[in-house]
Amino acid sequence: MAPLPAGIRFIISFSRDQWYRAFIFILTFLLYASFHLSRKPISIVKGELHRYCTALHGEEVEFKSQSQKASGTPSHRPADNETDCSWAPFDQDNYQQLLGALDYSFLCAYAIGMYLSGIIGERLPIRYYLTFGMLASGAFTALFGLGYFYNIHSFGFYVVTQIINGLVQTTGWPSVVTCLSNWFGKGRRGLIMGVWNSHTSVGNILGSLIAGYWVSTCWGLSFIVPGAIVAAMGIVCFLFLIEHPKDIACSSSLVAPKGCENGTQRVRLQKQIFMDKNKPLDPEMQCLLLSDGKHPVHQNHIVVLPADSGGGMAAISFTGALKIPGVIEFSLCLLFAKLVSYTFLFWLPLYITNVDHLDARQAGELSTLFDVGGIFGGILAGVISDRLEKRASTCGLMLLLAAPTLYIFSTISKMGLEATIAMLLLSGALVSGPYALITTAVSADLGTHKSLKGNSHALATVTAIIDGTGSVGAALGPLLAGLLSPSGWNNVFYMLMFADACALLFLIRLIHKELSCPGSATGDQVLSKEH
């Protein structure tokens, strides 16, 4: 018999469950990356909506003056608040306030809608809910770009489009986090979600490149193309997303169950978990390899239960989710952590332009290094929290280092381009690390907390509460930066350092709990001691 090709041997070396799990990981990564891809065009197109055309007028003035002399027509000079190549109504002196209102309308709608999204989402099938959100988001992203082709100059049109888009985009985060948590156990959740959360940076980078390709020639396509991509991914979601492993008879754990065979080996149980036969099975055990508080469960142990993951339990209420230990603290911490992150997202290119004297395109490209640092920061936070088994302490350590790093950034970034590049990578890692960990692994931990007694319907609501509170900070950060920047960029950085200190302050109690219980298996087990 001829030996199998290397590629086939690689394929059959993984079990059916592992292939499905990898597929869901990649699919949800691409789905939410497309959401971020569609949010980026507005920051790229701002420079086109209000352009200073000094260079353009300088090149054309000689030709125009010669033609005007030949024809005998008087020359026309735009008023001080007019530019021939700007887009009304953003061609006025108050264009900064108008552009800021577009950001604020989207972020406020997103923050408000997120609180409702989790409650609605946990009562509907994830696949249908996410598909609707992606199709609607694609439509309203493209609608903004249609204003270019239909020559729409109504400020209200663009504001309403941003508000509705912000609302429908809230369907994304609770849905993808819930789906991913259904498929992956808690053992390496920090690392897995740290890698997975890089979709935020990948989406931002792709959105910048796609929008930048058309921004100078036809800025309407900078919105229509990303909108079409989001809508197309919505169709992919409807056709391929599998909400839970039980839907296709797969194991929820990261280790293959007993009797599961692949092409090269049979994986067997190494140890058996004995439980009280008179005690009803905890549905939480079907999704995650958790300890019941009395029987420690290690990663080489496997529990396979036939029940339906608690599907018969009622969805948790908003106030019920707030009572889960740690939800309020992590939500308030994320408010300030996301404030810092989104301030960089919306104002970093302008800061680089002012400090390093680069043009808008170069500043935009250089600002992507902050996202690159964010990728490594999210992965690093996940690895450390898995190794230490302490989520709050990991976030606290990175927040503690982030504040002085921001001060150093504000000081040495003025010394040259090389210093700016180094500090962008470091700041991106320390700022994005806690943000990524809280919105992914921490949200999943709290959404499957032991105090819920196996109710698997709480994850979407918990995720929405945490990210919704963080989105309030995301709306406030750019607004405060806009108010403080005229008085000097140092004041903006002082505000960011203060926000980092506040984020750390809200975690002090949880950090103390973790450090006082060094033998605890997971952060949520520390929190459950309060019950």
Image (cartoon, rainbow, N blue to C red):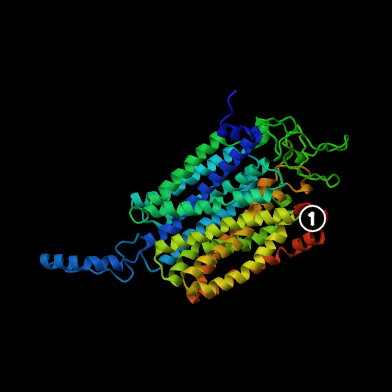
Relative placement, left or right, of 62 versus 196 is left
The answer, for residue 160, to whether it is visible in the render is: no
User: Where residue 215 sits in the image (x, y, percent)?
Assistant: 37, 55
Q: Please give the residue where the numbered disc 1 appears in the rendered image.
A: 526
**Residue under the image location 60 percent in, 69 percent down:** 405
Q: Quadrant of residue 240?
A: top right
The answer, for residue 152, to whether it is visible in the render is: yes
User: Where residue 99 sits in the image (x, y, percent)?
Assistant: 44, 62
**Residue kind at label 1, given as amino acid type:** Val
Does residue 304 sit above or below 293 in this rendering? above
Q: Quadrant of residue 400?
A: bottom right
Q: Element type at marker 1?
A: helix
User: Where residue 254 sits in the image (x, y, percent)?
Assistant: 69, 40
Taking the view exactly as shown, the residue that stands out farthest to the top is 1
- Please tell me which residue lies in front, 261 or 22: 261
Does residue 166 sit above or below 6 in this rendering? below
Relative placement, left or right, of 69 versus 412 is left
User: Where residue 146 sits in the image (x, y, percent)?
Assistant: 38, 49
Quarter holding the N terminus? top right
